[in-house]
Amino acid sequence: MNFPSIQLGQEAPDFTLYNTEKQKVTLSNYRGKTVLLLFFPQAFTGTCTKELCSTRDNIALYDRANAQVFGISVDSVFTLARYKEDQQLNFPLLSDFNKEVSAGYGTLYDTFVLDMKGVSKRSAFIIDAKGIVRYAEVLETASDLPDFTAIQTILKNLN
């Protein structure tokens, strides 16, 4: 897969990834529902845990907006399953172990900490019920968080 950078108003590139229950999840199967994709660098790290636990604690906001949240990282399904359990996350985590989706959405670091290559940048994308990208934020600094106020506003306006 080789997608261009994501632009607002374009159709979201479709993908299929495995969740922590080792089941395939395909984005296009969620047509008719708003989707929030949260790409994050790595499980078990401070800022990622803060971001995903905040999402967990505010899941009612996403439910009210009829939005399905997915956390995506290049960690393995097995690592993500342990992380989801440890943090009691109440939304699916998807493994982009082969880095194809992260690359396609323009969210891969060339080099991350400790010379790691191919780690997802912290990013947020809102895809509307028709599969159109309505919000796209790719952060260069891993310790920064997405603008959840803007995300909430867009989610409210889509309903």
Image (cartoon, helix red, strand yellow):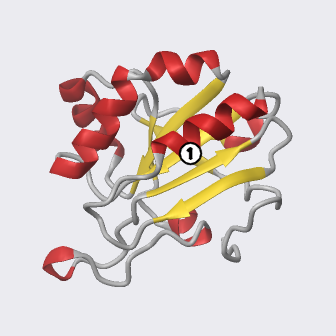
Relative to 60, is 141 on the left or the right?
left
Q: Decide if residue 45 is in sight here.
A: no
Q: Quadrant of residue 141?
A: bottom left
Relative to 2, is 90 on the left or the right?
left
Residue 26 drawn above or below residue 114: above
Q: Quadrant of residue 71?
A: top left
Residue at position x 32%, y 50% from top?
76
Q: Secondary structure at mark 1?
A: helix
Count the labels in the image: 1
Q: Decide if residue 55 is in sight here.
A: yes
Q: Check disc 1 and give the amino acid type.
A: Ala
Residue 82 drawn above or below residue 138: above
Residue at position x 49%, y 69% from top?
107
Q: Position of residue 116 (x, y in %)?
A: 23, 77
Q: Position of residue 119 (x, y in %)?
A: 34, 68
Residue at position x 35%, y 43% from top?
77
Q: Position of residue 142 (x, y in %)?
A: 29, 65
Q: Nearer the viewer, residue 1 or 44?
A: 44
Residue at position x 74%, y 53% from top?
133
Q: Position of residue 101 (x, y in %)?
A: 57, 62
Quadrant in which the C terminus is drawn: top right
Please rate how many residues cluster around mark 1, counting C-alpha atoms within 10 Å: few if below 14, some from 14 to 19, many from 20. Answer: few
Which residue bears the numbered disc 1?
Answer: 150
Relative to 57, is 94 on the left or the right?
right
Residue 95 drawn above or below residue 97: above
Residue 72 drawn above or below residue 116: above
Q: Nearer the viewer, residue 58 or 45?
A: 58
Quadrant in which the N terminus is drawn: bottom right
Relative to 154, is 143 on the left or the right?
left
